[in-house]
Image (cartoon, rainbow, N blue to C red):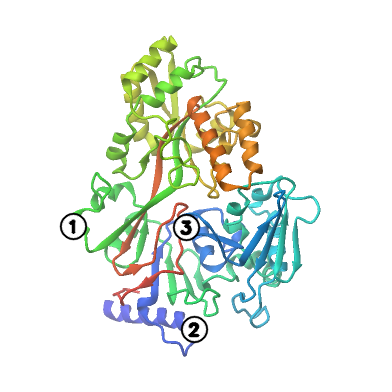
Amino acid sequence: MRSIYKILSFCLLLLLLSACNPNEKKELGSVFRFNISSAINSLDPAFAKDQASIWLVYQMYNGLITLDNELNVKPALAKSWEISEDGLHYTFHLRTDVHFHKNDLIAKERTLKASDVVYSFQRIIDPKVASPGSWIFNDKLAENKPFKALNDSTFQLSLNSPFGPMLSLLSMPYCFVLPEEVVAHYKSDFRKNPVGTGPFQLKVWKEGQVIILEKNQDYFEEGLPKLDAVRVSFIESKETEYLKFIQGDIDFMSGIDPAYIDELLDKEGKLKAEWNGKIELLKAPYLNTEYLGILQSTDNTALNKKAIRQAINYGFDRRQMIRFLRNNIGIPAEQGFIPFGLPGFNPQADYGYSYNPDKARQLIKQSGYSGEKIKLLTNSSYEDIGTYIVRQLNEIGLNIEMDIVPPAFQREMMAKGDADFFRGSWIADYPDAENYLALFYGPLGAPPNYTNYSNPVYDKLYEAALKENNEAERLKLYRNMDSLIMKDAVVVPLYYDQVLRFVQKNISGLNPNPINLLVLKNVSIQKPIKTDE
């Protein structure tokens, strides 16, 4: 019976994959399979606010620009662009060979036009749409017609003041382009009837069970995509996902649950010897800085002293913490708050902190510290790291206790300014260091300035960086800002995270990147593989 079931399931998948073009030969080896363990409820890029949604819409849509694996801005729907000298106008010249996915609601070979970009951007900020991405244009747009179609192939974006990171911001999925007539027809149901310009288009979606994407035969990048189809399952159990990967039933697994990390990785973060030749481990920097924040103007007299804040930074061993608690997944954060892998990170920085318990004790003594209690606010997911840090800080003479609370309560405390000393993390919304340094810009307040840091020199540097369109000059300003927050020790960087991908040996082209985007258009499968589909 099991064999018959396998055959029937296999035939059903082939039927689904070939429905759009029965004359095209489909091979099972060209179907890429992966799992998403969280449910999604929309394939509309205006609502792509979590990783699962972003991974899927990234296959079906394009933006004006894109990013390569080193986070360099590259052409996509726009083949070129210019920025005015005053930094207020961005003029994009669109490709003329881009078509939307074939659909009964649009004309045959419907060509992308500048008016589509205008519509898509206007839709982001439309209060009736209520896109969670509306913030990306907050306080940035010119009052009069910020989005213009100068002609069918020229789009112009106008700002009310310069914003240097704008191109990076436009790479976000919220800015993907879609056809107005299809959205107007489906309205809220566009979420399950997506039409874009991307390398794949939706074929089947059984909500909570499976999504099948098929190759866009008219995709504008020559020779892409290399796959015939993509199959996505929605198995919530991390254990089941892990077992299916080990059995070869899915082609890649992003990250790994702590319960199974020791089965695949040694303490150096390398694939264990028994898995060599069977699967492949891919690593890359991930734009996520894990840190401890210290509230300024707190009632805690100890934390108000810079020497104590600096002692905390010197007082625990980040390298040992990463090795023993994370199997060397991550990079000890010894060079500042800007994470490794992001332009602006300074590998030669002399303003960071490394483990120096003698220096920490000296600072504690100089501060006149008399044993005041300091509470570290965290949640159960980070209890092991918190315990490690508290123990080492207590050993150098500080009186630290850990307070474990639910994540929602912790966020509320941070937002209200009631958390003196707290664990936090910041994952990049877009790949520009401004997105990290905004956490310490005084006028913003919490969120995102949960430390309530206010430094006039820092604020002037931040404002100057926003107006600077020369990237090299902007990076200098970013590094100066990073050095200031390290000198004032308002934050305790713990580690810069890493992307981990476990991949079957016959898969190529699935290169990781620092914002953990899933780019499948370059993926290929070397040979057919067995399946239970």
Q: Give the number of the disc on residue 19.
A: 2
Q: Residues within 10 Å of mark 2 (few under 14, many from 20)?
A: few
Residue 21 in percent (x, y) is at 50, 86
- Lateral position of residue 386 relative to residue 306, left or right: left
Amino acid type, mark 3: Leu
Residue at 27% over, 79% down: 3
Q: Give the number of the disc on residue 274.
A: 1
Q: Residues within 10 Å of mark 3 (few under 14, many from 20)?
A: some
Tag 1's secondary structure? helix
Amino acid type, mark 1: Glu
Residue 451 in percent (x, y) is at 55, 29
Amino acid type, mark 2: Ala
Q: Which residue is mark 3?
A: 517
User: Image quarter for residue 154?
Assistant: bottom right
317 shown above or below 111: above
**Is tag 3's residue or tag 1's residue first in the polypeptide sequence?**
1
Q: Quadrant of the N terminus?
A: bottom left
Going by the picture, which residue comes out furthest to the right? 144
Closer to us: 389 or 47: 389
